[in-house]
Amino acid sequence: MDGATRTYIETRGFHLRGFVGGALVGCCGAAAMLSAPLMPLSATWQTVASSLGWGAFVVGCGLRFWSTLFVGGRKVGGRREAALTTVGPYSICRNPLYVGSLLIGLAFALWLTSATVLLAVALAALHYALVTVPEEEAYLRREVGAATFDDYCRRTPRFLPNFAGYESPAEATFYAKALRNEARRSARLLAAGLLTAVVGALRHTDMWPQWLTLP
């Protein structure tokens, strides 16, 4: 297939989709780390924000790992199975990997108690919702057939989970390479999370360099 006829999902831009969110959250997070909070929080509220951050982080990583169990290595158009995954986490929402990533981004904003980082997460979410996901779903609709995909869409919300629709197979095949990749990604995120949580606490003290003032 030549470059003129390649769809968005088959281009390098699609495969670098995670870079958009990572760059936005990473750059804004780095700026927040070197800034004084616009509204310093009390120790109690710092603890609340940190606890909520860890909750969002654990749920986000767990959702991503669970999703990888079911979709890793078998995506439509991938090297393994041209079949639509509609069970496990994909029976409660159509994009559980993206929802997991959003929760992880939210965790970083909570750890840093930063509206700037929260705005970056929101912009990244908009990019996925308005650009990446519609293009991806149009591709899936062509690959598996309009009737099959439209029926799946009627049963399963795009983002907000519907636990009443949960389905789990009696047996499932998991791909070790996909799980190893997600485990390495989770380990890197955990290291980044620990660093961010510590910096978030230090950011409210006089000992931390405060070169900027950001919300």
Image (cartoon, rainbow, N blue to C red):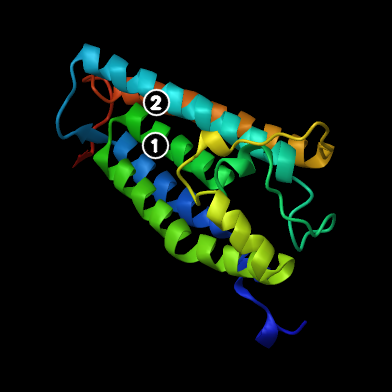
| Residue 33 % position (x, y) | 33, 34
Q: Label 1: state its secondary structure.
A: helix
Left or right of 154 on screen, residue 214 = left
**Mark 1 neighbour class, 10 Å CA radius: few under 14, some 14 to 19, many 20 or more:** many
Relative to residue 198, is residue 162 depicted above or below? below
* Location of residue 173 (image quadrant): top right
Circles 1 and 2: CB atoms closer than 8 Å:
yes
Q: Alpha-carbon distance for marks 1 and 2?
A: 7 Å
* Location of residue 77 (image quadrant): bottom right
Q: Residue at x 52, y 33 (%)?
A: 60
| Residue 24 % position (x, y) | 41, 52
Q: Amino acid at mark 1?
A: Leu
Looking at the rendering, in which quadrant would you find the C terminus? top left
Relative to residue 95, is residue 132 depicted above or below? below
**Could you tell me if residue 155 is visible in this image?**
yes
Q: Label 2: state its secondary structure.
A: helix
Relative to residue 102, is residue 150 depicted above or below? below
Report the front residue among 205 and 81.
81
User: Which residue carries the number 1 mark?
Assistant: 106
**Could you tell me if residue 185 is visible in this image?**
no
Q: Which mark is residue 21?
A: none
Q: Amino acid at mark 2?
A: Gly
Total residue callouts: 2
| Residue 168 % position (x, y) | 71, 34
Relative to residue 75, is residue 100 depicted above or below? above
Q: Residue at x 58, y 34 (%)?
A: 63
Report the front residue among 86 and 79.
86
Query: Which residue sits furthest top?
Result: 44
Looking at the image, tell me whether mark 1 or mark 2 is earlier in sequence order: 2
User: Which residue carries the number 2 mark?
Assistant: 53
